[in-house]
Image (tube, grey):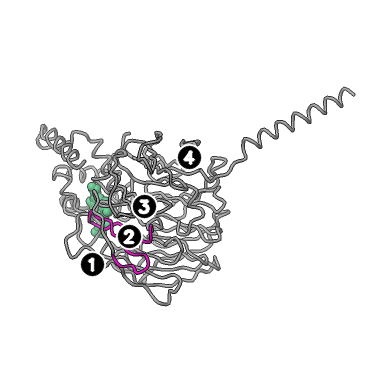
Amino acid sequence: MKARLYLLLIAMCCAGNSSAETFVPVSPSEMTRLVRQDCGSCHGMKLTGGLGSPLTADALKGKPAEALTATILYGRPGTTMPAWKSLLTVAQAQWITARLLEGFPEEVR
Amino acid sequence: MRSLAYLFLCCVLVLVLGACTTLSTLRGTGDLGVVIERADGAVTLVNTSAKAPYARVDGLGDLSHASVVFSRDARYAFVFGRDGGLSKIDLLESRLVKRVMQSGNAIGGSISQDGRIVVAQNYVPGGIKAFDAETLELLSEVPAEYAPGKFSKVVGLADTSGNRFAYALFDAGEIWVSDFSDPKHPTTKKFPAGKNPYDGLITPDGRYYLAGLFGEDGIAKLDLWQTEKGSSKILENYGRGEEKLPVFKMPHLRGWSLAAGRAWLPAIGRHEVLVADARTWNEVARVQVKGQPVFVMASPDGRQVWVNFAHPDNGWVQVIDTLSGQVIKTLQPGKAVLHMEFTPRGEAVWISARDDNRVVIYDTRSFEQIGGFDVKAPSGIFFTTRAARIGF
């Protein structure tokens, strides 16, 4: 399972590199699902908050992208926000931050 | 004469029809339940004898992290939504009876010993609120204000004797016990818990309240039969100072943790189930498992403990034999296993696989799949047996 996930992530990165500066994961729908469902277990599926703080565009307005990306990758010690660097690449974390700041897309099922 | 005969015929017809409809509508609810459709704000109503859904009720709002308690006649399900919605559903008529928005951000609820009060636990605004189970009218509330102007998220709400409810304050590190014997004027006692309690449970006899801690290794314990003795800690320092793994999902606690005289509890940030003697509360064993446990759930007879895991190991389920303390089976029920629920006497377990859009049913003796059905993004599964259990 772990191995499969890593393979998937590697596949995402490779495909993303085809367009050098704008990173697009091979399957945005997988990423969208990860954020809505797995980040959603703390931040809420609608990202309006739960144990984690709200991640809506309104809530994040004015926060620097780099800081948010760093939070995703390295977590926030002393809170329940975990470090995702073992599961997400820098580019993927940046992709998530960019989507969060503009209002995260809905999942298409 | 003719009209008399006609009248007679009519009467017979009415009687026959009447009998038919009563025959087909009279039924108990002991084998019914609710499956949350996480993404669609709906619930699927299920029958565990038929191993199949029988109806669907929608319009329930944001049901990510929704939970359900049942009225004591086991006819009504109270669904607590993430968005603060509280919905009362009639399992027999398959319809939404009433829905109120009771807060901005909720996490679950509970029902009183006498069945008359439904209590919701809230993140925002932090606190608990009591409602009349019949009408869903607000009776009273206890804001979780632990310091002037500071409100805590409330977790781990569970009912116990005397219409009391125990719960934990995530931000304050406290356990509170509120007595609703006068539903409009609750009284509250407060006890220290430890750093960041994330969930709590009440043992099946209603005696002990346990709160799992996120901010430190250990579990807080309060004897509800003699609260004057205060709270204490068990399983302290189970991580032995080692760095824990990142926790991608908080575990859940509930009274199903007790089996074969022991408590089976998820370790935080470790691939372990902790086992404590349920009389001395000393650690007696640890079971190494596939990932970080989320639900550690004993079967009704306590012979088996089923465990599912946090992301990225959430495709697995493991079964521990409580006599040997060994993992005896490893299953792959589907993608993103979120919840499990045993049938009333435990011959089968129902498992939700969110990303497969499927509920699968396993025989607990043979571990064979004996059924299943499609349902969109299923999460929690709740059977009416919970209606009669303390702490559910």
* Tags 2 and 1 both on a single chain: yes
| Marks 3, 4: nearer the viewer | 3
The residue pinned by badge 2 equals: B198
Residue B211: percent from left, percent from top: 35, 64
Rounded to the nearest angstrom, the CA distance separating label 3 from label 2 is 17 Å
Q: Chain of mark 2?
A: B
Q: Quadrant of the C terminus of chain B?
A: bottom left
Secondary structure of the residue carrying tag 1 is loop
On residue B237, the disc is: 1
Is residue B38 in view from this perspective? no
Relative height, residue B44 to residue B217 (above, below)? above
Rounded to the nearest angstrom, the CA distance separating label 1 from label 4 is 42 Å
| Residue numbers of the magenta segment | B260-283
Residue at 48% x, 56% y is B389
Q: Chain of mark 1?
A: B
On residue B46, the disc is: 4
Relative height, residue B54 to residue B9 (above, below)? below
The residue pinned by badge 3 equals: B297
Q: Are marks 4 and 2 in contact (CB under 8 Å)?
A: no
Q: 10 Å neighbourhood of mark 4: few (<14), some, or many (≥20)?
A: many
Which of the 4 image quadrants contains residue B214?
bottom left
Q: Are marks 3 and 1 in contact (CB under 8 Å)?
A: no
Label 2 amino acid?
Tyr
Secondary structure of the residue carrying tag 4 is strand
